[in-house]
Image (cartoon, rainbow, N blue to C red):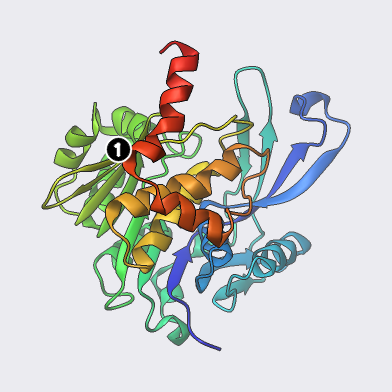
Amino acid sequence: MTGPEVACVGETMVVLAPDDGGPLEHAGRLAVGVGGAESNVAMGLARLGHRAAWVSRVGDDPFGRRVVAEIAAAGVDVRTVTVDPAAPTGVYLKDPGPAGTRVHYHRAGSAASRLGASDLADPRLAGVRLLHLSGITAALSDSCRELLAHALAGRALPGARTTFDVNHRPALWPADRAAPALRDLADRADVVLVGLDEAGTLWGGADPAAVRDLLPGPELVVVKDGPVGATALPRTGPAVFVPTPPVDVVEPVGAGDAFAAGFLAGLLRDLDLRACLRMGHLTAAPVLATPGDTAPPPDPAGIARALALTDREWAAPARRRDEGSGT
């Protein structure tokens, strides 16, 4: 079996959500699913035809077996997942409401919280081109933070570019505590993805250029601004902005992970930054339009047609959306 091109590292949990979409406290039945930012990225990359591995730990329990089976079914290499007999698989619950969906975690002491630098020593990861990490892992435990520091120092997988999605989760740690740690980790990565809203909450970055100034270390910073668009800011050279195509949003959970998968696929294909950003938007759109955390990306022919559009043709749907909304 050929080795992976990308290794995605982090916790994946079982997700319990009311099957009628109503509030959790009135739910009669719960639907069971699987959710984790880094494995979402791995599944997105696999669906785009890339060899992706997921590095994590799960409990020796039914939920752990379900998590591994679902991720493997999406085409992800799960040989680098450790089954921990002494700790459980994490669980989180979705609570839909008029103001949006709240999330309740039951992950303290989970198997994945015991991840450490040694989990990246698997020889099957040799030759990986991208090592994808996220700020969620930093909030889980001291050993998880040591893993990130080890990986971002370039000692874990020599030759691999490190990509880091800030992914601040207020339910795991408040902004005042997370801000310095996440900024330090992000500034050590080769490529950083961050939402403009979370950068503002964490560090006060008011626009993409300000965020780039806050993170001078990475070779590339990608700032996502929801329905407006995304901007790629290289260390040298001009910034590149691509507007978000219109989509009827059902639920935004998982769209950031899908964007990351598309953008990283573009990097693996050596596309220019404009095409990489378009890839991110194209893979995020189907997730925004569904209630789940993942969705199949457009077919290769559809992606090829979208990448071939001129800037004016790409922007035309966004202009129609803005004109229709009166903004």
* Residue 271, quarter of picture: bottom left
In this orientation, which residue lies closer to the viewer: 130 or 173?
A: 130
Residue 41 image point, x, y percent? 51, 57
* Residue 264, quarter of picture: bottom left
Say left or right for 79 vs 187: right
Q: Quadrant of the N terminus?
A: bottom right
Residue 16 image point, x, y percent? 74, 43
Q: How many marks?
A: 1
Q: Is residue 49 visible?
A: yes
Question: In this view, which residue lies farthest toward the top?
Answer: 326
**Vertical side of 261 occupied by 222: above or below:** above
**Residue highlighted by disc 1:** 179
Element assignment for label 1:
helix
Q: Quadrant of the C terminus?
A: top left
Residue visible at 24% across and 35% down?
Answer: 208
In this orientation, which residue lies closer to the viewer: 99 or 87?
A: 99
**Which amino acid, by three-letter code, is at mark 1?**
Ala
In this orientation, which residue lies closer to the viewer: 81 or 280?
A: 280
Q: Is residue 230 visible?
A: no
Residue 289 image point, x, y percent? 62, 37
Say left or right for 211 vs 167: left
Residue 252 image point, x, y percent? 56, 35
In this orientation, which residue lies closer to the viewer: 23 or 53?
A: 53
Residue visible at 31% across and 64% down?
Answer: 162
* Residue 89, quarter of picture: bottom right
Residue visible at 17% across and 39% down?
Answer: 214
Residue visible at 16% across and 53% down?
Answer: 217
